[in-house]
Image (cartoon, rainbow, N blue to C red):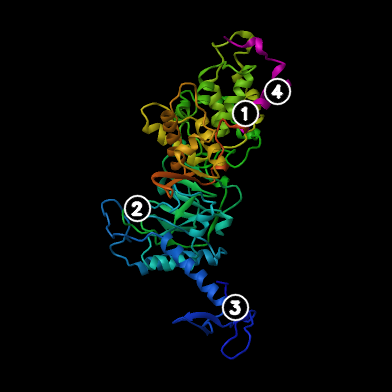
Amino acid sequence: MQPTNYSNIESPDNNRIDTQTPDIAVPYFRDGELEFRSPEKDIETLAQERAERRQTRVVSKSAPRLNNRKCDHQEHDNPKCICNISDSERAELLRDYLQELDEAGWTNLRLMPVNRQKEPVIANTVGLESKRAYDLLHTPEEAIAAIKDGAVGFCLYADKPGHNTDGLVFADRDEPNQWPDLGKTLRVISGSGTGDHLTFINAGDIGCAKAKGELKGIGSVRGTNWFVDAPGSVHPTGGIYHMVENPDIAELSNDDLPRELRPGSRANSTSSAKAESIEPLESLPDDFNPAEVTNDVGITLKQVRRLSERLNYLLSCINPSGYESLSEADQAAVRSLLIWRFDETDIANILRSCRDRRGRVEEDAHPYKMERDDYVRRTIQNTAIPYKVDPDLFQALLKDAKETSGSRPSAGNFSLIEVREAFASLDGEGTVTQLVESGHIIWRDGTQKSSVKKRVRRCLSILEDAGYVSGKTNPQDRRKTLYVAHELSELRIPGDDEWNQVTRSLREPNENNRGTENSSGRAG
C-alpha cells in the first residue's frame, strides 16, 4: 500500500491545504473515512503547553513533600515548628526572605529542593554542575508554590553564578555566642532553633571553611558551592527555618574573620604561597600536636594520614626513597599537605615537627635546617600543586576507612583511577563485569575475577558516597546494577598522571637547594 500523500489532499472547502499556514486542517480517519478538522490551537501554543507540562512534571518530582508532620520538641528550641504552622505560612517565610534579597539586588535566584534530612535532593546522586541538577532548580515563584503545596523546603548555594547568587555568602553559626561580632546583617534562625545563618555580601576573598583550632565546632563560613537551607524549610526535628532580622546585608571579608574561620590560602588557588602567610619558628607551641591539626574542611592530620599512604610515609620517614635529597622530600611532603587542603602556617609547623632532622641525620645533611625560617618559607613558596582533593571525595574516603576493619580505605587511589578510566572507555556507564573487563582494571598474576570485582565494588561504593557515581536497575538484565558516572572524568585523584608530572618537575635541579645539600647527605 502506497503511503498517503497528504500534500495532495484537498480540504472540505475544495482548497489545497497550505502547509505553511498555522491553522492547517488536520487529516484523520473516522469510521474508515478520511475527514478534516482545524486544530484548536496553533503550533506555537501547543509547543509551549508541552514545555509547561514537562516543567510541571520536573517540579512535582524534584521537590520532596512532607510525608509526616511529626515534631520532636525535645530536640529543637524553635518557636516555629511543623506542628504549629501551615504550609501557606511556611511559603510566606520563604517569600519574605527572597523579597529581602530581591530588594538588595539578587533577582531571579535559583533554589535547590531539600529532603527531610535537610540535604539537597542531588546529594549522592548527580553532580552540582550536571544538567539534571540544573533541571531541578526552582525559580522563587516555583519554590514558594511548592512549599505551599507541601514541599519540605529549599536551599541556596552561595556565590554561584549559575544560580544567580553571585556574591552571596553565609555564616552557618552552630554556636552563635562563640563567634566574633560580624555586625548586623540578614539573619535566619536554623531549624534546630539554637543556631543561625547570617547572609553577607562577599567582599571578594571569602572561601569555604569549617571552624578549626580553638574555634572548632562553632560552625562554618559558606562560600562558593556550599549551601544553606532557606526559610520555610523543615528541619529533621520539625523546626522551621525563619528570618528574624532583616537590616541591610553587610559585607564580609577575610579580614573580619579570625584565622580559625578562614580557608587555607591555597583553598582557591594553586599559586605559590605568600611569605607573610607563614609564621616564624617561635610560633610553634611547646605542646604542638601535629595529629590534631585540621585542614579547611575540618579533618585532622591524623585522619588524613590514614587516607594517604604517601603522606604518611613522607611524615614518618626522614629520608624516603625516590627523592634525590632531603629538601625534595620536604617539598613532596608540602605538596601532599597542600593537596589535602592544609593551611601554609599549619604546614610549616607540621614540617618542623614531623620532619625535624635533629638527631636523625648526619652533620653533612644539615640537621638544623628546619630551624631556619627562610628554608621553611622557601620550601612552601616554591611548591605548586596541580589540584586539591575534592571535599566530597575526602569525606567518602574517610567514611570508608572508618567502616572497614583496617585503618585505611578499602580501595586505594590507583584503584579509583582505574575505575574512572574504565567508565570513560564505556561512555560513562557500565556494570561491574563491564568495568572489570574494560581493560583499564589491572589484574595481577593469579588474581581471581571475583577478587577484582570485589575491589571494583569497593571503589564504586566510595565514588557513590562522593556523588560521582550512582546505580540503577540494568534495563537489559534487571538482576544487575548499571552504574552511571556523573562528571567522574573531571575528578582529580591523588596519584594520577598530573600528580606524577609535578613530582618529576620537583626533582629537576634546584640551585638554591643543591648548593648546600646533595644525595651524599641521605641517611640510610
Place residue 6 in its image quadrant: bottom right
Range drawn in magenta: 498-524
Side (left or right) of 237 relative to 294: left
- Element at badge 3? helix
What separation in Å lies between label 2 and label 1 (alpha carbons)? 46 Å
81 vs 218: above or below: below
First in sequence: mark 3 or mark 2? 3
The C terminus, quarter of image: top right
In this rendering, the label closer to the viewer, 1 or 3: 3
Few, some or many C-alpha atoms within 10 Å of disc 1 (few <14, some 14-19, many ≥20)? few
Few, some or many C-alpha atoms within 10 Å of disc 4 (few <14, some 14-19, many ≥20)? few
* Disc 1 + disc 3, Cβ < 8 Å: no
Q: Which residue is mark 1?
A: 500
What separation in Å lies between label 3 and label 2 (alpha carbons)? 66 Å
Q: Which residue is mark 4?
A: 508
What separation in Å lies between label 3 and label 4 (alpha carbons)? 75 Å
The N terminus, quarter of image: bottom right
Q: Which residue is mark 2?
A: 192
Few, some or many C-alpha atoms within 10 Å of disc 2 (few <14, some 14-19, many ≥20)? many
User: Is 519 within the magenta?
Assistant: yes
Q: Nearer the viewer, residue 29 or 312?
A: 29
Instruction: Give the residue displayed 60% in from the left and 81% down from the top.
Output: 22
In this rendering, the label closer to the viewer, 3 or 4: 3
Q: Which residue is mark 3?
A: 6
- Element at badge 4? loop
Q: Which mark is residue 206?
A: none
In this rendering, the label closer to the viewer, 2 or 1: 1
Name the residue at the front extreme: 1
Instruction: Give the residue displayed 35% in from the left and 67% down from the top.
Output: 87
The percent position of residue 386, horizontal first and vertical second, equals: 62, 35
- Element at badge 2? loop
